[in-house]
Each structure stands twice: as structure tokens, then as C-alpha cells.
Image (cartoon, grey):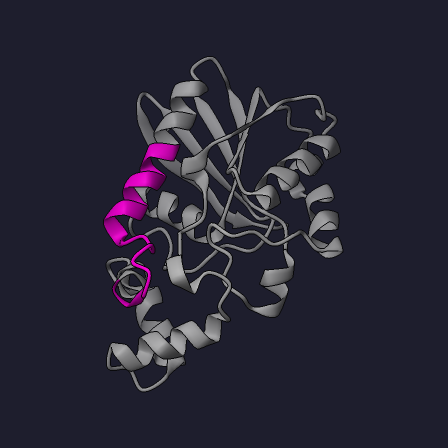
């Protein structure tokens, strides 16, 4: 049996001011670093056999801080491109509320709040599809590209952890949601788990199941 402790990176400057990050990056805030050092994983006295993160510095730094906190600062972190956040294309760095208002207008919703409610409760990745359709640079990922990539990330972690019992994987809000929904489509709305929260995945006899989602305490 393999346990994957899937953690969202620490809070960043862009998280704080409400800007989209995606494939771009923003540094961890002091609060974000402190939260990573105080991550609930450390309270369980867990030892990891391997560690992974996306290639984004905010995720790699968070992984390093968590490992430092559990006394495994020397464990190498394998960076996987497929664990990256959703790519917003030409909207990278935009204020979140500005994008939501634009997408609301283009898709017939009265306001940004109504669009946000709709995409969170949708039975497909409405946000990814809307962003991809609206992106002036045609670089944003549509639902198929994004979900295929996130499933591939999970498969790579399993493949590279064949001899492991417990691994750490640090990724991003939308990516973690996509991974959880690939295991159980009803497990979570299209809503990001909190920064530095822990979602536990279990692989047994070739099948994935979800042990917990977005734990912070």
C-alpha cells in the first residue's frame, strides 16, 4: 500500500492580493513559510520514503520546509512538470475577480459571483473550458489537457514510488482538486483546498482511494 500526502503550497504574495498564478510564480510570504514549517504532518511523526513537488519554486520551497520540519531535510525533492498548476495562458497574473467578471459577461452570467458558483458546482471543468475559450493567446489549458496532465502526474508518482510506503507531494489548488476528482468525481467541488492543507491518497491493489481532503488541523 502506498500513501501519498498531497499538500498545497504555502501562501504566496499573489494568493494574498488575489492574482492568478498558474504557471507563473510568486514568492511565499512569511506566513506561508511559517505555515509550511508548522504543517500538521510534523505532528504525526511521519517519515517519508520519497518527496515530489511541481517545478514551481513556491511548491518546491514548501516541500523543502515540510521535510525540514519532520527532520528529513536531506531527502531529495523530485520536481514533476505535470504537478504544475493550471495554465491560465494570457490571463496569468490577472486579478482573479477581473477574470471571473470577464468570463461571467462572456458566458451569460449576471455577475462574477454567479459564474463562480456555477463553475464550482458544475459536473465538468467549466472554469478551464471558459478560460481556454477566452484566452487571447490560446495558451490556457482546456479541461482535457489539464485533467490528462494531472492524471499523468499521479501515475508518475505511483510508478516512481513502487518501493515506497509513504511519500510527500506538494502541488497547487486547482491541480489537487483535479487529482481528487479523477479518483472520485463527487469528492469535492471545483474549489481549491487551503494552503498547506493535507489530502491523503491511498493506492492499494492498483486502485486509488481518498483518505482525507484538505486537512489543516
At horizontal 69% and vertical 52% (from top left) the residue drawn is 32
- The answer to whether 49 is drawn above or below residue 62 in the figure is above
Magenta region, residue range = 133-153
**Extreme residue toward the bottom, this view:** 110
Horizontally, is 180 left or right of 96 in the view? left
* Quarter of the view holding residue 70: top right
At horizontal 42% and vertical 53% (from top left) the residue drawn is 174
> Percent position (x, y) of residue 170?
54, 39
Q: Residue 151 in magenta?
A: yes
- The answer to whether 119 is drawn above or below residue 115 in the figure is above
**Extreme residue toward the top, this view:** 163
Nearer to us in this view, 174 or 123? 174
> Percent position (x, y) of residue 141?
31, 52
At horizontal 33% and vertical 60% (from top left) the residue drawn is 137
Magenta region, mostly helix, strand or loop? helix
Q: How many labels, in total?
A: 0
> Percent position (x, y) of residue 121?
31, 66
Nearer to us in this view, 156 or 204? 156
At horizontal 27% and vertical 63% (from top left) the residue drawn is 126
Horizontally, is 59 left or right of 210 in the view? right
Q: Is residue 70 visible?
A: yes
Horizontally, is 23 left or right of 117 in the view? right
Horizontally, is 210 left or right of 62 in the view? left
Q: Is residue 184 visible?
A: no
Nearer to us in this view, 88 or 60? 88
Q: Residue 152 in magenta?
A: yes
> Percent position (x, y) of residue 213?
47, 47
Q: Quadrant of the N terminus?
A: top left
Amino acid at each position: 500500500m502506498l500513501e501519498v500526502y498531497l499538500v498545497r503550497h504555502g501562501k504566496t504574495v499573489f494568493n494574498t492580493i488575489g492574482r492568478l498564478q498558474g504557471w507563473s510564480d510568486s514568492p511565499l510570504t512569511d506566513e506561508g513559510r511559517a505555515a509550511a514549517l508548522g504543517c500538521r504532518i510534523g505532528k504525526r511523526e511521519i517519515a517519508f520514503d520519497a518527496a515530489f513537488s511541481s517545478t514551481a519554486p513556491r511548491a518546491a520551497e514548501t516541500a523543502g520546509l515540510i521535510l525540514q520540519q519532520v527532520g528529513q531535510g536531506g531527502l531529495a525533492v523530485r520536481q514533476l512538470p505535470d504537478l504544475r498548476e493550471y495554465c491560465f495562458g494570457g490571463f496569468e497574473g490577472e486579478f482573479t475577480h477581473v477574470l471571473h467578471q470577464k468570463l461571467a459577461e462572456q458566458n451569460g452570467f449576471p455577475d462574477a459571483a454567479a459564474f463562480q458558483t456555477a463553475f464550482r458546482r458544475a459536473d465538468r471543468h467549466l472554469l478551464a473550458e471558459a478560460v481556454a475559450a477566452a484566452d487571447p493567446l490560446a495558451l490556457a489549458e482546456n479541461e482535457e489537457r489539464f485533467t490528462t496532465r494531472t492524471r499523468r502526474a499521479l501515475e508518475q508518482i505511483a510508478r516512481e514510488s513502487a518501493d515506497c510506503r509513504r511519500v510527500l507531494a506538494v502541488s497547487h489548488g486547482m491541480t489537487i482538486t483535479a487529482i481528487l476528482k479523477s479518483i472520485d468525481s463527487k469528492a469535492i467541488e471545483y474549489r481549491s483546498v487551503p494552503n498547506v492543507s493535507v489530502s491523503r491518497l491511498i493506492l492499494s491493489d492498483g486502485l486509488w482511494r481518498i483518505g482525507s481532503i484538505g486537512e489543516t488541523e
